[in-house]
Image: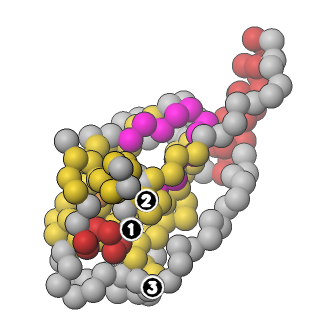
Amino acid sequence: MSTRLSRAAQRVGCTNVTTKTPAPRIRFHRPLRTLALCTWLAAGAVARAADPGIEVIDAWARATPPGVETGAAYCRIVNSGAADRLIGARSSAARTVELHTTTDSRGVAEMARATEIPIGATATVTLAPGGTHMMLVGIAAPLVAGTPIEITLVFANAGEIDVAVPVIDSRAAPPPPEHEHHAH
Ligand SMILES: [Cu+2]
């Protein structure tokens, strides 16, 4: 079921980009492949202890004008492990945080609420204007540029990840990615 993109939602820019890490070109025979995977996972464990493999980076949201009750937040979800699913989100800044996808229906952007966002194994999923995003519904107060909000992302396997989300000026361009390549 999809809803026509409201003017407010258009303003915050509801949009969708999904990037998948290209498949590795080198094929190992099974024992080697297992060894390589173990080394990789061990390296990841050094970076963040007890990390199940999901990292949330480059989060941002746009400031909202007074009287507007919805906002949108974006980020990149970097998965260095097995497939997972983003199954929800919440924030003290909004009554509810919905997961939305956006599709182009004959030139009209339409948002649909998603129950979950699949996160492929060793894939990066980008939540961005025009694509998949987190919709902040019933925001308690306007989102103000320079005042970050907290969003908790809930994954089926990785559990809950708290993210500090910077709020940028409503007219500013989306911030460039901080991490072009994710260090393993
Ligand atoms: Cu939306």
Which amino acid type corresponds to the residue marked 1 in the rendered image?
Gly
Which amino acid type corresponds to the residue marked 2 in the rendered image?
Gly
Question: Residue drawn 38% across and 55% down?
Answer: 107
Please say if 149 is above or below 118: below
Which quadrant of the render holds ligand 1? bottom left
Which amino acid type corresponds to the residue marked 3 in the rendered image?
Arg
Q: Label 1: which residue?
A: 13
Residue at the farthest front position: 106
Residue at the farthest top position: 30
State which region is magenta. 117-127
Q: Position of residue 54 (x, y in %)?
A: 52, 45
Q: CA distance from mark 2 to mark 3?
A: 16 Å
Q: Label 2: which residue?
A: 130
Question: Residue drawn 40% across and 83% down?
Answer: 170
Q: Is residue 120 magenta?
A: yes
Which numbered circle lies on residue 144? none
Q: Secondary structure at mark 1?
A: loop
Q: CA distance from mark 1 to mark 2?
A: 6 Å
Q: Position of residue 6 (x, y in %)?
A: 23, 66
Foreground residue among 116 and 108: 108
Question: Residue drawn 83% across and 25% down?
Answer: 26
Which numbered circle lies on residue 171? 3
